[in-house]
Amino acid sequence: MRKIALLITGLSVSVQLLAQNDDSLFIRRIANEILLNGKAYDNLRELTKNIGGRLAGSPNMVKAENWGQDVLRKTGADKVWLQQCMVPHWVRGGKDEATAFYLNAPSKGIAVTRVAKNLDVIALGNSLGTGAKAILADIVEVNSFTELEAKKDQLKGKIVFYNVKFNSTYIRPFEAYRDAVTYRGSGASRAAKYGALAVIVRSMSHSTDNNPHTGAMRYDSINAKIPAVAVGLKDADWMDEQLKKGPLSVSMKTNGHFLPDTIGHNVIGELTGSTYPDQYITVGGHLDSWDPAEGAHDDGTGIAHTIEIMRAFKALGFHPKHTIRFVLFANEENGTRGGKKYAEEAMAKKEKHVFALESDAGGFAPRGFGFEVTDDQFAKIIQWKSLLEPYGAGNLVRGGDGSDIESLRESLKTPTSGFLPDPQRYFDYHHARNDVFENVNKRELELGAISMAALIYLVDKYGL
Amino acid sequence: MRKIALLITGLSVSVQLLAQNDDSLFIRRIANEILLNGKAYDNLRELTKNIGGRLAGSPNMVKAENWGQDVLRKTGADKVWLQQCMVPHWVRGGKDEATAFYLNAPSKGIAVTRVAKNLDVIALGNSLGTGAKAILADIVEVNSFTELEAKKDQLKGKIVFYNVKFNSTYIRPFEAYRDAVTYRGSGASRAAKYGALAVIVRSMSHSTDNNPHTGAMRYDSINAKIPAVAVGLKDADWMDEQLKKGPLSVSMKTNGHFLPDTIGHNVIGELTGSTYPDQYITVGGHLDSWDPAEGAHDDGTGIAHTIEIMRAFKALGFHPKHTIRFVLFANEENGTRGGKKYAEEAMAKKEKHVFALESDAGGFAPRGFGFEVTDDQFAKIIQWKSLLEPYGAGNLVRGGDGSDIESLRESLKTPTSGFLPDPQRYFDYHHARNDVFENVNKRELELGAISMAALIYLVDKYGL
């Protein structure tokens, strides 16, 4: 009996090894297809260079939706459709401007004069403008909400400058972002509570340039909706230095406002499953982007990954067992209405969703994947580590999916995952004017598509 | 007895865990020091922007040596000295030029005319120029040495075009380089054997631009020393296309020549060991670079890493047990005379070298290290994996050190290692005009220094 048991164990190990070998060979075919015949880079060029920034509600949003439909169709989807959702329609409304004024230090009989210096700023997304007249006020700098509270009696009629540095000692910059983004998100309302007229937020970045980084903010329902801008890092450091020498005032003018909500769409392409056509695997990125640049790493690369996975599957004649949905989500940046709509409709139609994967961390070389799954599911996933390692994507960790698929997880308990590319350069470009095609590397982009395709292939084959 | 044995085993595991925890904390201190107070990026800026390209024998070589001495001293080396070696002195001698001529296709009564197109070329390092008069000859394209041999009767009086593509299906581009570099190295002599007048080599890269990539070639002692250039990838593809339509001739002019060997130096800084002052750990990169750019990733970043490790150790008050030598090697690119000299002197002085580590694969985010060590040594090293993983450097593999330390390994059996940063972008810049400071990312550079410092710390503490 023991011998038979051993034999069976041995057999099962061999079968598993053979399967792993088959998988390894198929993933190698995916890799060759993408590295030799890949269209991810060309698709990204079209989206970024021919269309450009594509904020929800903008004319470019519509262009991007049309482009997405067209590409998904050309790439060979069995079915392509638009899933309508209402999206917010914030517009920048003009050029954001800020000028700092300070008194020069008197020296050798030169009289004290008022000196002006332009600051490189960008209004935060969803923020309301100053109106036709600029706001001119003294600056009060704070480095935390604790300091804001401590200085609450000094804020009336002032501009609050949140100079909260990106913590560079985190190895994963996303942790620095998590800490800092609260000042961008709620800094305006918290300062307005004490009578501040506007806020300036240090950009959420550790870049070496002075490009300001925008991103979503939100007003609470209680306090005045005061203007809010992000300022470039060099200018932020300069303001900090200047404030040590004496008072600093800033004149700022922004023009942000909301137009009525408008119609946007998730753009969805499907490859129909051979065995479980009514069970869905979702892979996607978001089609919208902030307006100052081309939305290359955020999230043109997620879109390019998504389409490339379908292209590779078709080119290899791979027929998935489950229906795979390739989703170009609407309005991630300032509303996640696309992700919410997708989950709502899945709920309403009682769809069975097996897995969802998002790429929204840039088109850099793969490191791995984060998973929001049960212990049992993770135990299964971790067995695939050696299949993903050759492509640099062997770092499989718990936690982290993506804004567009979290509604699916929350409402349908769908296991979800986020692609984890190397994170070091992401916040150099994130929501800034340099998030352009030229800052995406072709091979790094392709390796991301390979890793994601491999994971989708494994989930489709083995389930979760 | 068994219980005691278990107890001892348990104790030893605990001691090991405690030690790992200490190590983890110290490496975290290294990381914080480098991420908060790092000078690697500033040092790299000085070397690349204030000095620039620094080929062996050039005036910039001398400037770089002076700078290196100065920085090592300022950084706190116990001892700094120059180790003299004779270096080759190849000079480009002027602008490299090539023009292609072809016949346009006759259409609608337009006569056939000869059309000229400039090609973006760069003479290979060590190659001899065409002389005052350009070489004009028909092109014969080959895609391998096998094809060269097959066409040997067609080569007399022609220019051979080695259009050997970088194999993009390798996940590690260094493997593509290994395959392709033989055409750069020995292509000229092998074509000269059959009477070719010159060679044009497709650049060793998979970049998306047209920058030609130089690099060392060598003539054999038998055949004519014919001129040799690299051509940009877009021009290479164009030539290939054009040759399918009809004959193509190229006029090329290069000016490379050798001046007499001259004096160069390894620049060496030392931190004296507290316990084993006469046992050496070497860490280094190479100070020389090709001339068309600033030698940023090749190998300014290796120099910046090297100096930064010393700076961090000093800042943390870390006193190594072994003497650590920080070596800025001379003449890696076209002679490796610096590395050879270093090993020769170590042999002559019967020095005991415990370990040597080189950074010469760019300043990208760390992935791990390659090791040229014994099985026992590797078994020890692999235990450090979990200490290096948090910094992205957990990929510890057999094989691969660096050109400057291989002589030490060969002559003294020193265990050696090469830092392995992410390899995807290296050959976009390698030996080309875009290998400039702007293409190095500050955090990626710093993370490399952290990983290398951690490894040096572990080898110093535990030996090999």
Image (spheres, coloured by chain):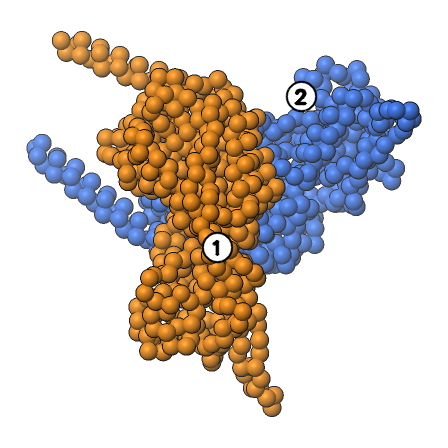
Chain colours: A orange, B blue
Residue depicted at x 57% and y 62% = A95
Residue depicted at x 68% and y 47% = B291
Q: Which residue is mark 1?
A: A259
Q: Is residue A199 visible?
A: no
Q: Kindly indicate the quadrant of the structure image that contains residue A187.
A: bottom left
A323 to the left or right of B287: left
Using the image, determine if residue B75 lies above or below residue B119.
Answer: below
Name the spot of residue B158 as percent of width and height, x first: 82, 24
Residue depicted at x 23% and y 44% = B17
Name the spot of residue B187 as percent of width and height, x first: 70, 27
The residue type indicated by label 1 comes to Leu
Q: Which residue is mark 2?
A: B144
Most foreground residue, B378 or A453: A453
- Chain of the residue displaying label 1: A
Q: Kindly indicate the quadrant of the structure image that contains residue A384.
A: top left
Label 1: which secondary element: strand
Q: Callout 2 environment at 10 Å: few (<14), some (14 to 19), or many (20+)?
A: some
Label 2: which secondary element: loop
Residue depicted at x 49% and y 19% = A316
Q: Let me know if marks 2 and 1 both belong to one chain.
A: no
